[in-house]
Image (cartoon, rainbow, N blue to C red):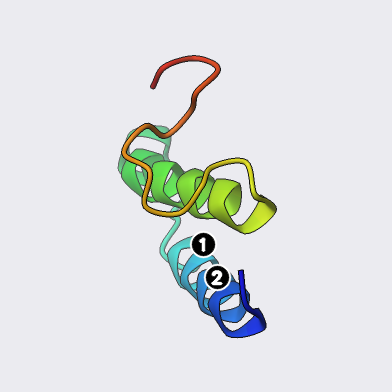
Amino acid sequence: MSEIQQNELRAQIEALKATLVGEMFADMEAKDKIHNLEMQLNGTKPGGQYIDCVGCGS
């Protein structure tokens, strides 16, 4: 993953974190997106893969 792609993922994560309001149900979708982006950033999930988590099958 290139430095530009990493920076784009970090920017998306920060933008989503800015939308969090501290209520579990209201934040659930944003937190899921943040988690998926962090997995891509950390190399846990290959980019473009339709399965989010190989370990749990989510």
| Residue at the bottom extreme of this rendering | 4
Vertical comparison of 38 with 58: above or below: below
Mark 1, other Cα within 10 Å: few <14 / some 14–19 / many ≥20:
some
Mark 2, other Cα within 10 Å: few <14 / some 14–19 / many ≥20:
few
Query: Could you tell me residue 53's position as x and y percent?
Result: 48, 28
Observer-nearest of 42 and 30: 42
Observer-nearest of 17 and 6: 6
Query: Could you tell me residue 14's position as x and y percent?
Result: 55, 70
Question: Could you tell me which secondary element the residue under label 1 belongs to?
Answer: helix
Q: Is residue 56 left or right of residue 27?
A: right
Residue on which disc 1 sits: 17
Question: Residue drawn 46% across and 71% down?
Answer: 12
Vertical comparison of 3 with 12: above or below: below
Question: Residue drawn 51% across and 62% down?
Answer: 17
Residue on which disc 2 sits: 14
Query: Could you tell me residue 3's position as x and y percent?
Result: 66, 81
Question: Residue drawn 37% across and 52% down?
Answer: 48
Quarter of the image with the C terminus in it: top left
The kind of residue tagged 2 is Glu
| Residue at the top extreme of this rendering | 56
The kind of residue tagged 1 is Lys
Q: Are marks 1 and 2 in contact (CB under 8 Å)?
A: yes
Observer-nearest of 28 and 4: 4
Splitting the image into 4 quarters, where does residue 50 fall? Answer: top left
**Spatial CA span between label 1 and label 2:** 5 Å
Query: Could you tell me residue 37's position as x and y percent?
Result: 50, 54
Question: Could you tell me which secondary element the residue under label 2 belongs to?
Answer: helix
Quarter of the image with the N terminus in it: bottom right
Q: Is residue 44 left or right of residue 33?
A: right
Vertical comparison of 54 with 43: above or below: above
